[in-house]
Structure formats: structure tokens, C-alpha cells
């Protein structure tokens, strides 16, 4: 999300401090770029809507912000602490955890695909200005 936002706002790739936002803020800023001015921005709208319909942020938060354990005979158990709320304990399956991981990978892949020919500028590390080419 950060790389794509840097690319769309014509900032130097690698300047991640300029886009050090939460997921929600990155999402809002990417939505602002969906002005239809080019094919990437049109496709971005579709990807962001797909992510919302699949609840990708919530799925990601459940994976990242929880503690996960596997108990024999019980399944996978996680404890999640939401901001401003009490903790929640959820029992699930390893398959559900794997499904969430695949969903997150799919979302990342859809966003990466939007980079098009600029993928190398967005993905590869930038050479320091002091190094000759």
C-alpha cells in the first residue's frame, strides 16, 4: 500500500517515512487517488472495493494483532485485543488461518499488479545518490 501510494503521488520510492500511516489511513489516501485519470487508478478502485467486500483489513488485523496457539484436540485458538475493548478468545481451525493468509496474499498481489511497468521503480531498492551508475 505504501509503495503504491508513493508511486501514485509522484514521491520518491523508498521515502516510507512520508507515508507512515495506519492501514485505514493508507486505504483512505489510496481511495483519493481513484479519480479515473488513468487505467491504474480505475483498477485501484476495483481492488480496494474487492478488499472491502472480503473484509481484508479485519482479516489482517485478526491475524496480526492476535496471539495464536495450536492445541491438540481443540484446534487453533487466538486471543485478540481490540482498541478500547476487552479481549476476545476465538477457536478456529488451521485451515481458517491458512485461508486468511491466502486472502492477504491475494490482496497484496492485486495491489502489486497495479504497478505495471513501474514495478521495478516501486519494488527494487533505490541506489544511494552517491553511487555512480
Image (cartoon, rainbow, N blue to C red):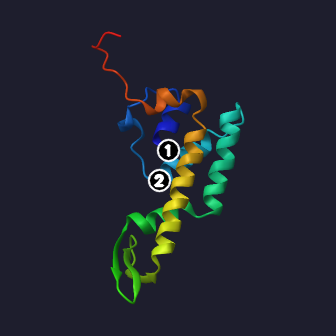
Q: Nearer the viewer, residue 59 or 99?
A: 99
Residue at (71% x, 33% y) in the render: 39
**Image x and y of residue 116, in percent:** 60, 32
List the residue tagged with mark 1. Answer: 1
Give residue 95's mark.
Answer: none
List the residue tagged with mark 2. Answer: 23
Q: Is residue 70 above or below residue 10?
A: below
Local SS, label 2 = helix
Badge 1: few (under 14), some or many (20 or more) residues near its Cα, within 10 Å? some
Location of the C terminus by quadrant is: top left
Q: Nearer the viewer, residue 126 or 75?
A: 75
Horizontal side of 64 relative to 120 (left or right) equals: left
Tag 1 and tag 2, C-beta contact below 8 Å: yes
Of mark 1 and mark 2, the one earlier in the sequence is 1
Residue at (48% x, 62% y) in the render: 101
CA gap, disc 1 to disc 2?
A: 8 Å
Amino acid at each position: 500500500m505504501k509503495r503504491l501510494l508513493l508511486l501514485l503521488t509522484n514521491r520518491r520510492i523508498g521515502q516510507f517515512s512520508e507515508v507512515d500511516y495506519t492501514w485505514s489511513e493508507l486505504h483512505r489516501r489510496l481511495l483519493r487517488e481513484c479519480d479515473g485519470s488513468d487505467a491504474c487508478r480505475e483498477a485501484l478502485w476495483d481492488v480496494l472495493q474487492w478488499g472491502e467486500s472480503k473484509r481484508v483489513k479485519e482479516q489482517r488485523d485478526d491475524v496480526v494483532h492476535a496471539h495464536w496457539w495450536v492445541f491438540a484436540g481443540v484446534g487453533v485458538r487466538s486471543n485478540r485485543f481490540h482498541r478500547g475493548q476487552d479481549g476476545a478468545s476465538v477457536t478456529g481451525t488451521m485451515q481458517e488461518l491458512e485461508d486468511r493468509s491466502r486472502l492477504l496474499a491475494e490482496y497484496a498481489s492485486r495491489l502489486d499488479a497495479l504497478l505495471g511497468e513501474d514495478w521495478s521503480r516501486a519494488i527494487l531498492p533505490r541506489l544511494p545518490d552517491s553511487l555512480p551508475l
